[in-house]
Amino acid sequence: VFQQLVSVLSHIDPPKLNESLGALAQAFSGRGPQLGQSLSDLDSFLARLEPSLPAFRHDLAVLPVVSNAYADAAPDLMKTASNATRISKTIVDEQRNLDALLISAIGLADIG
């Protein structure tokens, strides 16, 4: 570990490190409470998210299978939607005839 640390530190340019740390210090200056609240909020969010991670992993694992199933079914679904559109248009176009049929059926039910 020490050897790796020495290797990393040997590649760092001290003036650039000083400049970077100075910029960070200036950016966070006076914002300690805000940063602390942000970290606390993040912790709360992650605590609520964590219980659902196993289900999320499972969902990601089955996503390719589900996507392929939808891809295979897409042409049939589009055909069904197209047919439903035609049926709806026919019902609208034949509304008067449909009304007459239903009124006749009501009259027939009253007689029977």
Image (cartoon, helix red, strand yellow):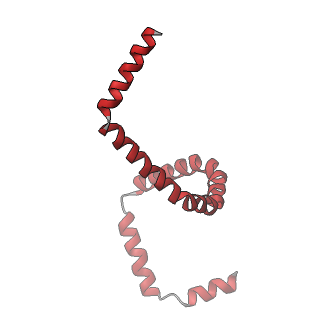
From where the camera sits, is residue 39 visible?
no
**Picture quarter with the N terminus:** bottom right
Residue at the spot 53% in from the left edge and 47% down from the top edge: 44
| Position in image of residue 78 (x %, y %) | 46, 55
| In the image: residue 13, left or right of residue 30 | right
The answer to whether residue 91 is above or below residue 31 is above
| Position in image of residue 6 (x %, y %) | 63, 87
The answer to whether residue 106 is above or below residue 55 is above
Viewer-side residue, 33 vs 54: 54
From where the camera sits, is residue 22 visible?
yes
* Residue 97, quarter of picture: top left
* Residue 95, quarter of picture: top left
Residue at the spot 65% in from the left edge and 51% down from the top edge: 55
| Position in image of residue 65 (x %, y %) | 64, 61
Residue at the spot 66% in from the left edge and 85% down from the top edge: 4
Viewer-side residue, 101 vs 83: 101
| Position in image of residue 66 (x %, y %) | 61, 58
